[in-house]
Amino acid sequence: MELGFLIDMDGVIYKGSQVIDGAVDVINHLVRKNIPFCFITNNSQKTRRDVALKLKKMGMQVEDRHIFTCAIATARFLASQKPQGTAFVIGEGGLNLALHTNGYSITEDNPDYVVVGEGRVINFENLEKATQLVHAGAKLIATNLDSNCPIENSIRPGCGAIVRLIEEATGVKAFSVGKPSSVMMRLARKQMETTTSQTVMIGDTMYTDILGGVEMGYQTVLVLSGGTKAEEVRNYSYRPNHIIGSIADLPNLFPQVFEEPLPVRQKKSPRPLSRKRHAVLAAHAST
Ligand SMILES: [Mg+2]
């Protein structure tokens, strides 16, 4: 059965700007063999082209179609809920472009939705504006509910922390589209064009990557190269199908996907007959 891989990025193929050992070889093997895969990220800041460029610089021969962000998931979801709608956005280029591409206009004048993503564009003014718009009836959408994001040697506040501020101020609960939401997990699989039983989710975070995969019925692989330690897995009421040190161990887990095709065989000259077979033939010939 053909398999397809949904692969989280931070903590799985790189950590900050540091590529994880073995990741480039594994990803380029998937590209070379035309095996379906898609990077699935809760970071809404960048467009898929920006993400692909970052990965290409690290040596991975990926294309735009290999990237699926929570910004794209959010924009497609909103377009299906209310085509040609309007949104007030706290977020950056990746989110704005995805919304525009999916027919949305961005406005602070009575929008249908307030959409919150990652980024450094957050200030008290736009938080105040978002709060007022939700209070006036705009629906609150989170691209994800991650409390924080890893950065080199520390963390920074994530989208979830910002969303909770608006939730607290307004008493309105956000709907979140990013991992582990089935909206994003399903859209990413559809982009990869695999069935549920063909889909494998690989990630370093239990409550997003693994939970999302478990809920969808995908095979799940936890890598220990990111934010989760092996002994922490028992703290959760669900578990991944497999736990591996890093993505470099993926070929051992799925040898059928990673085995190299057999080399082209040279046409062999006929094998010399064994002595026993010679004797049998000789006996026949003499009768
Ligand atoms: Mg991660």
Image (cartoon, grey):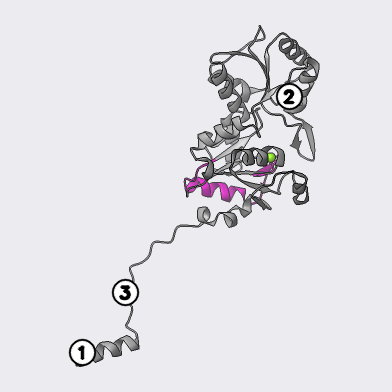
- Residue at image position (52%, 54%) is 258
* Element at label 3: loop
Question: Position of 190 compared to 17: left or right?
Answer: left
Q: Quadrant of residue 125?
A: top right
Q: Earlier in the sequence, mark 2 or mark 1?
A: 2
Residue, disc 2 = 120
Question: Position of 193 compared to 161: left or right?
Answer: left
Q: Earlier in the sequence, mark 1 or mark 3?
A: 3
Q: Quadrant of residue 159?
A: top right
Task: For marks 3 and 2, give the CA distance.
Answer: 69 Å
**Dot label at residue 285:** 1
Q: Is residue 147 above or below residue 256?
A: above
Indicate the amino acid at tag 1.
Ala
The one nearer the camera, 61 or 271, is: 271
Residue, disc 3 = 269
Badges 3 and 2: C-beta atoms under 8 Å apart? no
Q: Quadrant of the C terminus?
A: bottom left
* Element at label 2: loop
Check disc 2: other Cα within 10 Å, few if <14, some if 14-19, many if 20+: few
* Element at label 1: helix
Indicate the amino acid at tag 2.
Arg
Badges 1 and 3: C-beta atoms under 8 Å apart? no
Q: Earlier in the sequence, mark 3 or mark 2?
A: 2
Residue 211 x, y percent position in the rendering: 67, 39
Residue 262 x, y percent position in the rendering: 44, 61
- Residue at image position (48%, 37%) is 193
Task: For marks 1 and 3, give the CA distance.
Answer: 24 Å
Give the residues in magenta. 11-37
Indicate the amino acid at tag 3.
Ser
Determine the quadrant in which ligand 1 lies.
top right
Q: Quadrant of residue 155?
A: top right
Residue 33 x, y percent position in the rendering: 47, 49
